[in-house]
Image (tube, coloured by chain):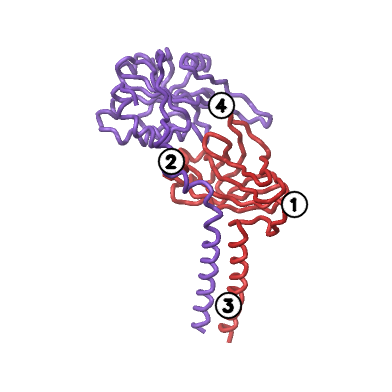
Amino acid sequence: MRRPALTAAALTGALALTGALALAGCSGSGTDAEPDAGSGKAKLSVSSPYMPQPVSADMAAGFLTIANDGGAGDELTGVSSEVAGQVTMHSTVGGAMAEKSSFAVPAHGRLVFRSGGDHLMFEQLTRKPRQGQTVTVKLTFAKSAPLTVEMPVKSATYNPSTGH
Amino acid sequence: MRKKTFAAAVLLAAATLTLSACGSGDSGDSPVAVVDGGSGSKRAATVLDQPFTKPDLVLTDTHGKKYDLREETKGHPTLVYFGYTHCPDVCPTTMSNIAVAKQKLPKSEQDDLRVVFVTTDPGRDTPAELGKWLKGIDPDFIGLTGDFAAVKAGARTVGISVEPTSKDKNGKLVSVHGTQVIAFSPKTDAGYVLYGESATVDDYTRDLPKLVKGAKP
């Protein structure tokens, strides 16, 4: 008696999920922070995340792009991860990096963390991330809801422009 | 009952497909277009009209022994980089790119090549720390540490400006790395090619066979 009931519940759930996923998939962006596409709100999505496999278990870098398709700007105010005691955000100018407490994600613009430029720094690693694994990263914003990103660990020499 | 479970699974699969079908257009802003155009068309190497003299650096290697750069690397193809180990991004990437490219050389050329990492953060990069870090990249790489003033002076002779490690407003130590790798010729011992930090593993792989012979890439 119990089993059919569960299955029916699962079916209902799957149907609901179908609607939700179809909606999210077709609304123009993979990981919406705000379902509302109105021009007065930031509309954030994350692409191309990766972490080069670090040399040691001391620290690692992470890179990603946050696009804002909305009509209002937002700010990335925090980053955290299960693999790190602390994740900090840095800008890099001429070989010197400086920690920043937030980065702007402009309206109709992008915030790009890339090798040699702005980057995320993972410290106090709980384990050494290895190529082929993924690291869960949570991004928090001044206005939009947080985004969770599965960041793949690539080789130490990975370059997104060559793809290897 | 079994049928219903299947129905749910099918619906779920359909939903997933819908998502990925619609989603695929959104996430492809960078990779696809760049695959072919990128590193092939633009050379990473800068060949200098007026080569640099090899810096007169006498420092301490990862075994704690005195290391005279000019004496030890004389007649060997040599790559020199100024960086520090508490560096998450450019320093490990640069050294890893060279390490991977080096593996493609014939064994005798690998043995001939000297890759020297000079720390800009001698306070934290002791011989032991430096040794441990380089071991994770290539155990044959040479790590040098010592007096910061000597490192800075040596870097300046090859056009690289570094500053001592300082504390930022949160009390965290911040160091500075060089932005270039300098290749020294085995024939002249002069630094004749520069690589910026955007040089990829492919760039080094393509150029190292020339550099080990002192040829222009």
Instruction: Judge whether A79 appears above or below B83 on screen.
Output: below
The residue that label 2 is drawn on is B37
The picture places residue B99, in percent across and down from the top left corner, at 37, 34
> What amino acid is labelled 1 in the image?
Gly
Instruction: Measure how far apart labels 1 and 3 are at the Cα level.
Output: 37 Å
Q: CA distance from mark 2 to mark 3?
A: 48 Å
Pick the quarter of the image with the C terminus of chain A: top left
Residue type, mark 2 in image:
Gly
Q: Nearer the viewer, residue B44 or B9?
A: B44
Marked residue nearer the N-terminal end (1 or 4) = 1
Q: Chain letter of disc 3? A: A
- Nearest to N terminus: mark 4 or mark 3: 3
Q: Residues within 10 Å of mark 3 (few under 14, many from 20)?
A: many
Amino acid beneath label 3: Leu
Question: Which one is closest to the eye, mark 2 or mark 3?
Answer: 2
Say if labels 4 and 2 share a chain. Answer: no
Q: Colour of chain B?
A: purple
Q: Chain of mark 2?
A: B
Q: Chain of mark 4?
A: A
- What residue is disc 4 on? A94
In the image, what residue occupies the spot 58% across and 73% down?
A14
Q: Residue at x 55, y 47 (%)?
A: A83
- The residue that disc 3 covers is A11
In the rendered image, residue B76, in percent from the top left (x then y), is placed at 31, 20
Determine whether, in the image, residue A117 is placed left or right of residue B187: right
Whether marks 2 and 3 lie on the same chain: no
Q: Colour of chain A?
A: red
Which residue in the protein does label 1 denote?
Answer: A40
